[in-house]
Image (tube, rainbow, N blue to C red):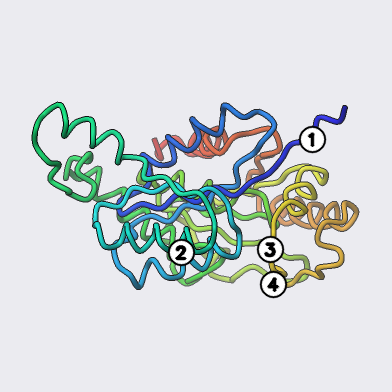
Amino acid sequence: MENKKHFFHLHLISDSTGETLISAGRAAAAQFQQSHAIEHVYPLIRSRKQLTPVLEAIDREPGIVLYTIVDADLSARLEDGCRSIGVPIVNVLEPVLAKFQTYLGAPSRGRVGAQHALNAEYFARIEALNFTMDHDDGQMPDDYDEADVVIIGISRTSKTPTSIYLANRGIRTANIPIVSGVPLPESLFRATRPLIVGLIATSDRISQVRGNRELGVTAGYDREHYIDRASIAEELKYARALCARNNWPIIDVTRRSIEETAAAIVALRPKLR
């Protein structure tokens, strides 16, 4: 029998950094070896305006929804939206808080991010997360010299989840897609502060991930060739050559978890620790 993995979407929505959800989601997903979670992390969701595009993203790529949102109105709006879409949703902290309230005989205070001490390290992580979200997928290219790390790679090499993971540890991270024939921003080549690292994977792995995702056409790609292994091999060849010309290190993420990829990036620049 073919040992084929099933891919599913896992949406993690938090009014804080999302670290609690990421840990819980991965711990649960790890129990299902034949399934691989494609993570979508939405941190700092604290208003209806911020929630609207999240619900639209869930509607486009339905899957399991986990969340930690203290505000009752926002929680109810999210629950109603997911019921309307027809996807399962779990408030990760609710059963735990209920047990605490029963035992302690007092309601919770409902403070956003109450598990974090308001110290310099916490604020650095929030700043890094905001920077990373602002600089996802090639956005705001003029600020690359303010980053600690810039991740580059072709489509579906885990650039965004790796960036968010690093940001949750206070590392300001930008990521840029590599598209054959499309030059990278000049500001990247002028940047002297950040570690610039390329992510690659095997053609088979990238084709599998692309084929299991319900995606629109990524800018610069012909959809007909998006999952074609030969086309992907050419994209990877271009990415490798680009990194080699600029002496940028390359990390193969084929058999690495997001945590392992992040650790490898940190190891390339010890001062990030």
Residue at 17%, 49% (x, y): give it. Answer: 111
- The residue type indicated by label 3 comes to Leu
Helix, strand or loop at label 3? It is loop
Residue 4: numbered disc: 1
Q: Can you tell which of label 4 and label 3 is closer to the viewer?
A: 3
User: Label 2: which residue?
Assistant: 54
Q: Nearer the viewer, residue 118 or 78?
A: 78
User: Label 4: which residue?
Assistant: 219
Category of crowding for the residue at label 2, using alpha-carbon neighbours closer than 10 angstroms: few (below 14), some (14–19), many (at least 20): many
Residue reaching furthest to the right = 230
Please state if 163 lies on the left or on the right of 153 as rendered: left
Category of crowding for the residue at label 3, using alpha-carbon neighbours closer than 10 angstroms: few (below 14), some (14–19), many (at least 20): few
Which label's residue is closer to the chain start, 1 or 2? 1
- The residue type indicated by label 1 comes to Lys
C-alpha gap between disc 2 and disc 4: 21 Å
Which label's residue is closer to the chain start, 1 or 4? 1
Which label's residue is closer to the chain start, 2 or 4? 2
C-alpha gap between disc 1 and disc 4: 29 Å
User: Label 3: which residue?
Assistant: 215
Category of crowding for the residue at label 4, using alpha-carbon neighbours closer than 10 angstroms: few (below 14), some (14–19), many (at least 20): few
Residue at 50%, 49% (x, y): give it. Answer: 88
Q: Nearer the viewer, residue 2 or 96?
A: 96
C-alpha gap between disc 3 and disc 2: 16 Å
- The residue type indicated by label 4 comes to Ala
Please state if 253 lies on the left or on the right of 81 as rendered: right
